[in-house]
Image (cartoon, rainbow, N blue to C red):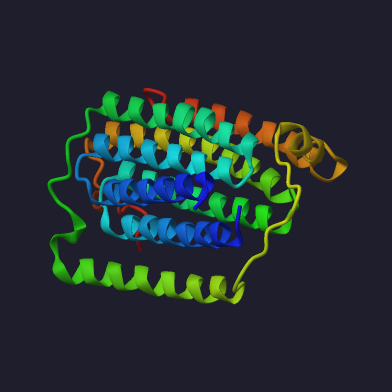
Amino acid sequence: MTIDAVTFYVAAALALVSAVVVVAQRNPIYSAFALIVTLCSLSAIYGILGASFIAILQVVVYAGAIMVLFLFVLMLLNVRPEERFAGESRRFKLTALALGALLAGQVAAVLLRVARPGVASDFDASSRPVARILFSPQYLYVFEATSVLILAALVGSVALARKDA
Amino acid sequence: MTPDIVQHALLLSLALFTIGAVGVFLRRNIITIFMCVELMLNAVNLSFIAFSRSLGTLDAQVLVFFVLTVAAAEAAVGLAIVISMQRHRDTLDVDTFSLLKW
């Protein structure tokens, strides 16, 4: 096994375990920290898959900005651990797991049809080639539209979180 | 870099998406449900990256960039809604918010 493969499997195991902790943990603060671990290991996997630009973005935007926002709100609202878990009722838990298994089965059926995806040679997804595509006429207007989206989100969140809203 | 890794990345993305979906079914705390949705978004991003690596095109990387932006906007608006919910009902249990239920 190459060093890439070893890193990949370690990161994948870490991501899986911490994702289970996110769902199973009753205290939302612990869920948030577990989610940060998931996001960071996913960033490592992006790096191994050659997407260095997205790997950096993942750490800066997701693990940095978004999760800090989550933790900030959790601390602000002083959230207590859930006393009532929907899984309390056995039937509900089983239904949820069965639905999850069904979903996994369906997606797996599609994925396995891709039987063995190949690997392109001389792949470079660092910031320069990605930016070239991002600012090409094909995506430029979409990119500009996201700025409007962010502005709307900014105004919307201020309006929603106002004292007298 | 072997095809194996790409395929296993796709399977990892499947597993993460399922875990996130089951979390949305099981949890009752709105913030935790929110985090499970983020988990599902990340699973989709991972499959984008894996397919990008497999096909050798960079369009998927641009899509991941947009998903990241939308996720950031969604988190900002969603958490503002959470704050206002907490202010009105003093709880984050989603079962207490059934005003729009028919």
Say whether residue A165 is visible.
Answer: no
Q: Residue at x 32, y 55 (%)?
A: B23
Query: In the current view of this chain or complex, which residue is farthest to the right?
Result: A137
Which is nearer the eye, B32 or A164?
B32
Q: Residue at x 67, y 64 (%)?
A: A118
Q: Residue at x 43, y 75 (%)?
A: A105
Q: Quadrant of residue A34?
A: top left
Q: How many marks?
A: 0
Q: Is residue B24 above or below residue A116?
A: above
Q: Quadrant of the C terminus of chain A?
A: top left
**Residue A75 percent across, percent down from the top left:** 27, 25
Which is nearer the eye, A96 or A8?
A8
**Residue B51 percent across, percent down from the top left:** 64, 57
Query: In the current view of this chain or complex, which residue is farthest to the front?
Result: A1
Which is nearer the eye, B87 or A131?
A131
Q: Does A12 sit left or right of A34 as displayed? A: right
Q: Does B41 sit left or right of A53 as displayed? A: left
Say whether residue A98 is visible.
Answer: yes
Q: Residue at x 35, y 63 (%)?
A: B102
Q: Does B74 sit left or right of B98 as displayed? A: right
**Residue A145 percent across, percent down from the top left:** 73, 37
Which is nearer the eye, B81 or A5?
A5
Q: Quadrant of residue A155?
A: top right
Q: Does A144 sit left or right of A163 as displayed? A: right
